[in-house]
Amino acid sequence: MTFRRRTLVLFILAAAGLGAWWYLHEPAPVRVKVLAVAPGTVEEIVANTRAGTLKPCRRAKLAPSLGGQIATLAVREGDRVKTGDLLLELWNQDLTAQVTLAEREAEAAEARARSACLNAENAEREAARQVKLDARRLTSQETLDRAITAAQAGRADCEAAQATARVSAAKVGVAQANLAKTRLTAPFAGIVAEVSGELSEYVTPSPPGIPTPPAVDLIDDACHYISAPIDEVDAAKVRLGAEVRVTLDAFGDRVFPGRVRRLAPYVLDLEKQARTLEVEVELTDPAPELAWLAGYSADVEIVIERREAVPRVPTAALKPDGTLLVLDPATGRLQARKVQTGLANWEQTQITGGLETGELVVLSLDQEGVEDGALAVREDAKQAESRP
């Protein structure tokens, strides 16, 4: 065997040995979850930074404007009331007596006014007769003057008495208004949430700047809205009327549609908390068969923009540097790919470049051995659908 042939044989044997060593020592393919890129819906969403709250459209914490002792407590917690129903009444016998006194004085003043006006009419008739007699020269000028003056004075007395009667009637209104201050009535129909006080207890109105517990807390439970804070960096994106999805812990995963009905006119600055903007959301389909209780915690997703039928991948498949891993079916190896993105949320991200529909994107990035160039065996994952 010549030297050239021996060299060739040795080279072939070395290559075969190297190949065998590489085959025996190459890492086994890793099993990875992959998802084929497909068109779908992608939304840009703004969510609340802290739990929102379900609030009634109307809530009144009521208390009498006067201090006094509770004489009548007409409701209990949980009672339903209609507009104008009596809730409680303070002891008011003195004010009731003042109303009666004012009414009697008004009646007396009205009677005096009628008497004065009758006298005025009589004086006017007498003056008219004296004028006729004077025309026939059957009376003196002095008598005529005296009759005319008496008629004018009588008319003035009538007007003064009528004015006094009107003053007395106004005093009745004042007395009734003072009496009404001792009665607490429902300003709207609703349910009594809380009653602070018992019969014969003394109620004190709140001094200026010092709030005290209300005597009756009344809630209109026929209408509710969601109040939720969003981060100030998202405030400029939100518009009135924007579509909203609402979830409440009390109702599990059920999603309720809504819309933005109000944006606070200022950003709330609370110590030790991020600055937030308060957003009010109106439920467009409140599901009246459910028990809506004020105070439920709620979360909101405000849809800023939506794009239909665009290539998308799960957001979790993207690395912070904007790359993802793609499985090449021909070679069975993973490839790092830089992509361009569009709209995104925490579930889906729109792909605008660097990736084609149908390519296999790796989802199991945290698995050991999943890296660029690694051998991999596919395990298909199901594409998550965006909520409507």
Image: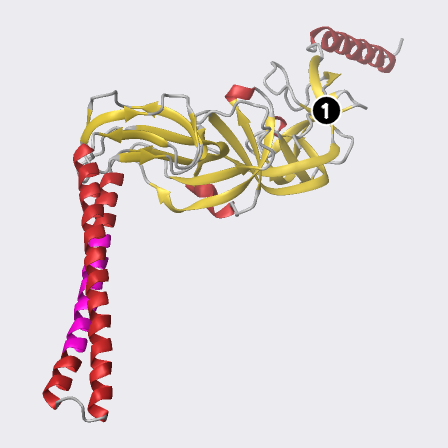
| 10 lies above or below 95 | above
| 259 lies above or below 376 | below
Outermost top residue? 24
- At x 21%, y 71%, the residue is 120
Circle 1: is it few (<14), some (14-19), or many (20+) Cα within 10 Å?
Answer: many
Does the magenta-highlighted stretch encompass residue 159?
yes
Outermost left residue? 142
User: What kind of residue is marked 1?
Assistant: Leu
Q: Quadrant where the C terminus lies?
A: top right
Most foreground residue, 170 or 42: 170
User: Which stretch is magenta?
Assistant: 150-169
Q: Residue 61: horizontal and vertical position, in percent?
A: 32, 33
Instruction: Determine which quarter of the picture holds residue 204.
Output: top left
Outermost front residue? 138
Magenta span: chief secondary structure: helix
Q: Residue 310: horizontal and vertical position, in percent?
A: 72, 39
Q: How many marks?
A: 1
- At x 23%, y 82%, the residue is 129
> Which residue is tagged 1?
35
Instruction: Determine which quarter of the picture holds residue 188.
Output: top left
209 sits left or right of 333 in the view: left
Query: In the rendered image, is residue 332 in sight?
Result: yes
Q: Residue 275: horizontal and vertical position, in percent?
A: 37, 39
326 sits left or right of 265 in the view: right
Does the magenta-highlighted stretch encompass residue 186?
no
Most foreground residue, 289 or 280: 289
